[in-house]
Image: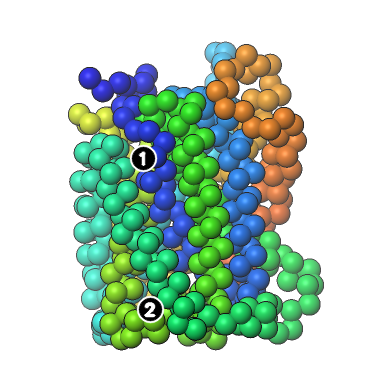
Amino acid sequence: MTEENSGGLARTVDWKEGMFIALGVPLLILPSIYDVASIIWGCCIFVWTVSVLQGFVQNMAYGEMVAAFPNATGLPGCAQAIFSSDKPTKGIDKGKFIGAFSAWCYWFAWCPVVAIFTMMIGDYLVQMFTLDISGWMAVGFYLLIGVVIVALMYVLGSRGLEGGAKAGTILALVSLIPIVIILIGALAAGMFDFSNITTNWTRPGWSWSLQDIVLVFGCFGLAQWSACAWETAAIYGPEYKNPGKDVPKALFGCGFICLIMYFFVSTAVYGSLGQSGIESAGYATLVPIAQFVFGDAGSYIALFFLIVAMILIIQTGFLGSSRTLYSMAGENNLPAGVKNTNSHGMPTKAMLFVSLFNLFLVFIIEMSAFVYGQTTTSMTVLTASAIGYCIANGVALTAYVKTKTNPRFKDLDRPFKAPKGWKYVISIMVAVQFFVWLPCLLYWSYYLTSGFIAIILGIVVLAAFIPVWYWVQ
């Protein structure tokens, strides 16, 4: 019989399977490499690499925290458990709200991955096949792609995480290896030119003024949304067979792969295309490289494997965000019905909500672009969710510091421990998240788009949770 924890999720996977489910994270660089490079040029290589290293700093703490709370669903579950009062309180538990809001921010950081990559798949299809669509026809086209994708994710996810992990393993091999081959082909074919990086390290007129520094920090705030996101391997804590050992192995196994991939992809793409080539390619940065390496047919090869890669990261976001909702319902921070599971121990109602929410995002963004002529793209949603990710990280890191300083947690069993004194390092990271990355990201968003659409979207979705939470209480 399958072992289950007290939360009802089945413990069916080991660290390798959890790592493979999270292995779509290196592909998160694809939708943002163009926008980051458009502001800081070749320096984007530095930003991506350092952001992955930032992930190691944070995930040392997350690994310890998740292993110490084996029934908590990753970061959101831990934040809710740590900030909730252990004593009966009169009225509203403000500490519980902090943990709940952090979990909601984390959900909004991961959930739109489905919509973002659905829209990117549509963008690639339109570009590759030169589809002449506009208006409501275009909206319907993107929605059709979304329906197909969320239906596939729902069917795969409903079968159980163990089956999803096996599918994730296949998708990881099918997507990551060919992309590496395409980029290695660029090196072998002589397309890569190191001078593309050295002569374009920063854009002309860059003076490291206060504005320039703020923009660099804003890029870090955006880049961590993808480069640090391998902490999602920890969200399956209640489903690992041995959380104390499986969580850190899955985390850092995925982390080392991300470190290699982020440095390699950003360096190979920028060195092969240069700034002008990236601006010409837009979001489809791998297509011209594939065309150079393999000829005209290479563009279709790149399209196929990029779509497979995008489906992999969509699966990661779909499974992770549905478990966040499940965790919140289990902590009485969302309606109880959200935590219902099927015979495979999968939170199907939460998965259904994730599906509908992402279809709504696709509809809103594409309608505003094709019907009302607004400058909204997948980056609009990405930037909004990155705002939620900053807040979620800040609160989750604060939760870790609380476990190290609050007497309530002094006897907590810690199967995995971060280095001694790590709470001081994490305290600095808390300040960085709230007072450096977050405000600089807000300015970065305004600077890039000359508007507040992404900021407004982020505020509306995050603030919508407040009345829902009070109603549930």
Q: Secondary structure at mark 1?
A: helix
Asked if residue 235 can be seen in this view, the reply is yes
Residue 467 placed where, x, y %?
47, 39
Residue at 62%, 14% in the rendered image: 411
Neighbour tally class for label 2: few under 14, some 14-19, many 20 plus, Cα within 10 Å: many
Looking at the picture, tell me which residue is in the foreground, 31 or 369: 31
Residue at 49%, 37% in the rendered image: 249
Q: How many marks?
A: 2
Residue 422 against residue 224 in the figure, above or below: above
Q: Quadrant of residue 441?
A: bottom right
- Quarter that holds the N terminus: top left
- Which mark is first along the chain, 1 or 2? 1
Measure how far apart labels 2 and 1 are at the Cα level. Answer: 30 Å
The kind of residue tagged 1 is Glu
Q: Is residue 88 left or right of residue 424?
A: left
Which disc is residue 290 wearing? Answer: 2
Looking at the picture, tell me which residue is in the foreground, 150 or 462: 150
Residue at 57%, 36% in the rendered image: 62
Residue 359 placed where, x, y %?
30, 57
Question: Which residue in the protein does label 1 denote?
Answer: 17
- Quarter that holds the C terminus: top left
